[in-house]
Image (tube, helix red, strand yellow):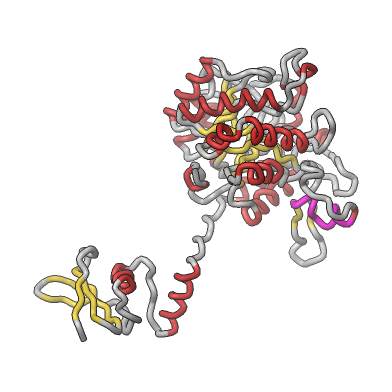
């Protein structure tokens, strides 16, 4: 599959959000209110959870009706090791029928909390995860969906849970032990789920009148490179571009490029109203989180790779959507008692502009320049010009013009070797005559 075969917004928007941590979701007028909030923020991607029995169907239907692309994780508590249940497989079929295409069937398998009790210690990482993922991916593709390569918790190079060595080992195992099966999955609908966590690895220059340029390219930004020259994303993926690690390994092992979607991550809400993870970079408060989130979306619009489709920051709501786990209360944009500044800031961004049209190929660019030098307007789709090239009729002497005869209108153009013409609308029947 080509990148253009995967659904994405018409304007190429990266702007998404992670729904609540719950497998159950608002209904009725409450859901309608949330959809209107998404529309006001011009959100075009939403990652949400399904209990494996269709608990997300009504939300997915509402999202699709509002031109918002759902990304559904078929939730299983402690999913490793293991594969999708039969009910989960049927739910995927039902969601595909609604129009859902993007599915996650695993989550952060580099963390012990995502493994069944006692299984983390038994080994099999990442080999067992990859075996199970290939089975699930083939099932999802057979049912018309697109499976995500599992997102990892960004954690650098730590021995036990390091995301970078885990990725390295996973792709190496696929290449060595299941190359053909993995290639077919990657080439027929798979995509890479990432959790691009910015932390405080971003900052803005303040040495010009416009407030300065935002930097989200850690570890390649000037601060990091001055402190640790030569450091690359393969040394530390705690970054907005952490997804380049699996994308690079996929290219090296399978010579493929597939979509990447960050289904969590982004600029986290600061716990307690202020956080500074890396003392080399400025910490931020709630207003700073709003400013950085807007800058992040804009940075991706300008600098994001063609294969990077969307950023879905963690987290739109928890308690306010009925999820009472206190672990996520401070992560939510919408609280029970307040709405964080990031909401108004994203709303003020307005919709993302449509991307510029792709540049013409070199031959068309040069041909357009040559026609312009003769004072003629060049249309690469014009039937008469194509016909003249195919039949070696030389260079244009006139632009296109219309001539009427016997109640009919003909489009005419003169070239050095002939005058060619066709009745307007009948472009498959072009004729020529001499000068």
Q: Residue furthest front?
A: 176
On the picture, is 273 further left or further right than 77? right
On the picture, is 312 further left or further right than 386? right
| Residue 381 vs residue 258, the one in the foreground | 258
Q: Position of residue 22 (x, y in %)?
A: 63, 22
What residue is shown at x 58% (from left), y 45% (from top)? 256
On the picture, is 93 further left or further right than 228? left
- Image: 91 above or below 209: above
On the picture, is 417 further left or further right than 300? left
Q: Does 309 appear in magenta?
A: no
Q: Which residues are magenta?
A: 217-226
Q: Position of residue 165 (x, y in %)?
A: 77, 36
- Image: 371 above or below 170: below
Q: Position of residue 434 (x, y in %)?
A: 20, 83
Q: Does 221 appear in magenta?
A: yes
| Residue 243 vs residue 202, the one in the foreground | 243
Asked where in the image residue 271 lies, by quadrant, the reply is top right
Asked where in the image residue 432 lies, by quadrant, the reply is bottom left
């Amino acid at each position: 599959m080509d990148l253009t075969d995967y659904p994405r917004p018409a304007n190429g928007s990266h702007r998404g959000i992670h729904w609540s941590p719950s497998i159950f979701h608002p209904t009725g007028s409450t859901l309608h209110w949330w959809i209107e909030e998404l529309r006001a923020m011009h959100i075009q991607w939403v990652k949400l959870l399904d209990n494996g029995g269709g608990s997300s169907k009504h939300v997915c239907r509402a999202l699709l009706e509002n031109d918002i692309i759902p990304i559904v994780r078929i939730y299983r508590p402690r999913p490793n090791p293991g594969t999708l249940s039969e009910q989960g497989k049927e739910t995927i079929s039902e969601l595909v029928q609604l129009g859902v295409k993007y599915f996650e069937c695993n989550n952060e398998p580099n963390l012990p909390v995502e493994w069944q009790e006692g299984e983390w210690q038994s080994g099999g990482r990442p080999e067992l995860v990859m075996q199970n993922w290939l089975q699930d991916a083939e099932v999802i593709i057979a049912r018309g969906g697109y499976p995500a390569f599992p997102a990892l918790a960004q954690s650098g190079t730590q021995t036990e849970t390091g995301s970078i060595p885990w990725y390295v080992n996973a792709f190496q195992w696929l290449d060595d032990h299941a190359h053909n099966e993995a290639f077919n999955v990657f080439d027929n609908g798979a995509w890479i789920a990432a959790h691009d966590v910015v932390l405080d690895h971003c900052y803005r220059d303040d040495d010009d009148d416009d407030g300065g340029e935002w930097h989200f390219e850690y570890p390649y930004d000037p601060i990091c490179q001055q402190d640790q020259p030569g450091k690359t994303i393969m040394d530390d993926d705690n970054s907005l571009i952490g997804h380049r690690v699996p994308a690079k390994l996929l290219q090296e092992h399978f010579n493929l490029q597939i979509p990447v979607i960050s289904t969590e991550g982004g600029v986290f809400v600061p716990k307690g109203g202020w956080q500074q993870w890396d003392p080399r970079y400025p910490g931020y408060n709630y207003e700073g989180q709003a400013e950085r989130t807007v800058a992040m979306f804009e940075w991706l619009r300008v600098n994001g790779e063609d294969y990077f489709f969307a950023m879905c920051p963690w987290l739109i709501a928890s308690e306010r959507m009925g999820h009472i786990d206190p672990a996520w209360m401070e992560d939510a944009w919408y609280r029970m008692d307040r709405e964080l500044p990031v909401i108004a800031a994203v709303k003020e961004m307005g919709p993302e502009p449509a991307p510029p049209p792709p540049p013409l190929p070199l031959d068309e660019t040069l041909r357009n320049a040559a026609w312009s030098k003769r004072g003629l307007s060049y249309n690469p789709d014009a039937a008469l010009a194509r016909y003249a090239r195919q039949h070696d009729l030389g260079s244009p002497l006139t632009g296109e013009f219309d001539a009427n005869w016997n109640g009919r209108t003909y489009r005419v153009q003169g070239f050095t070797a002939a005058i060619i013409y066709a009745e307007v609308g009948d472009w498959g029947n072009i004729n020529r005559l001499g000068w």
